[in-house]
Structures are given as C-alpha cells and as structure tokens.
Amino acid sequence: MVNRDFVAIAGGLVVCLVLAGCGGDEDESEFPAGVARPQSKVEFLREADRICFSSESQIEAAADDLLAGRGGPDPAQVEQVALKIAVPALETEVRAIRSLGAPEGDEQEVEAILAATERGIAEIEADPRALAKGTPPGLRQAQRLAQRYGSTQCGF
C-alpha cells in the first residue's frame, strides 16, 4: 500500500505546478507593432501544463525506480528522491511558471498556487521521508487550486 501511496504522491508533487492565469482573447490589431499581446489564460495554461508534464515525468521515473524493488521503499531512498529529484523539479517548475507572468487579472490566483507549492516544497524539505505517507498539505492545496484553475496536466 505504501508503494501505491508514494506513486500517487509523486504524481501529486507535480500537480501543483499548473499555476495559471486568465486573460482574454484580445484582437492583435489593438496592439501597436512591436508590442506583445497579453498572454491569454489558454496560452498560459498550455505552457504551464507543458512545464508540469516535463517535471512530472522526471518525478515519476524516479518513483518508478524507487518502487522497483521488493517491499516498501527504503526511507533513506524516499528521502533521496524527495530532496534530489522532487524538490528541485518543483522549484524549477515554480520559477518557470512564475517567469511566464500571469495573465492580466489572474495575478493573485496564480500567486496563490505558487505560494501553496512553495509551502509544499518547504514541508518536503522539513520531513522528506514523510513523502512516503502522502502528499504534503501545501502541495494538496496547490493541486486543488490548479485543478480548479483549469490544468489538464497537473493535479491528477
């Protein structure tokens, strides 16, 4: 049962990163030449989901390797995967999604998802072996917020 929980956790780790924003489908003719059109929510979600998918793949591969042996995962191995794979992947996702810039009007919503993800990262760093027991509360909150926002790759 621990193996199954850990796999769910590994998937949940990446969930949080779907952070998105909302914007409108503005007519490009409204913007002068050389001025970028604000990013729409759809465009933002597409890019955030791509980022999330990439990180999730890394975390899932590490979790698969961890679970390949007999019995439950060794706590020391869980800690190593948490600190060497999951945390760096989540930190990279947060930076990458933050660099996208939230669509106009959704800055607070996107920041709430990112802040919850950062809390989850801190929770993993504080007790990396607890990851074998379930997803940290900060990441669960980020997962809920990201799913509600419309992610198709994160939060499942």
Image (cartoon, rainbow, N blue to C red):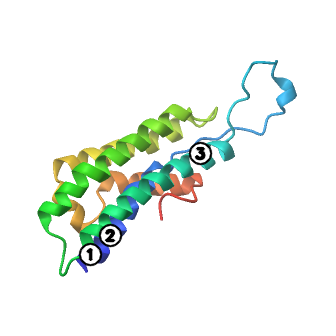
Mark drawn on residue 93: none
Q: Amino acid at mark 3?
A: Glu
**Mark 1 residue element:** loop
**Mark 3 residue element:** helix
Q: Amino acid at mark 1?
A: Ala
Of 133 and 108, which appears nearest the observer? 133
Of 28 and 138, which appears nearest the observer? 28
Mark pair 3, 1: CA separation: 32 Å
Mark 1 = which residue? Answer: 68
**Mark 2 residue element:** helix
> Is tag 3's residue or tag 2's residue first in the polypeptide sequence?
3
Label 2 Cα crowd, 10 Å radius (few <14 / some 14-19 / many 20+): some
Mark pair 2, 1: CA separation: 6 Å
Residue 94: x percent and y percent? 42, 40
Of 61 and 39, which appears nearest the observer? 61
Q: Which residue sits at x=17%, y=47%? A: 126
Is residue 77 in view from this perspective? yes
Up-down relation of residue 31 to residue 49 (above or below)? above
Mark drawn on residue 64: 2
Residue 71: x percent and y percent? 17, 81
Quarter placement of the N terminus: bottom left
Mark 3 = which residue? Answer: 47
Is 7 situated left or right of 45 in this image?
Answer: left
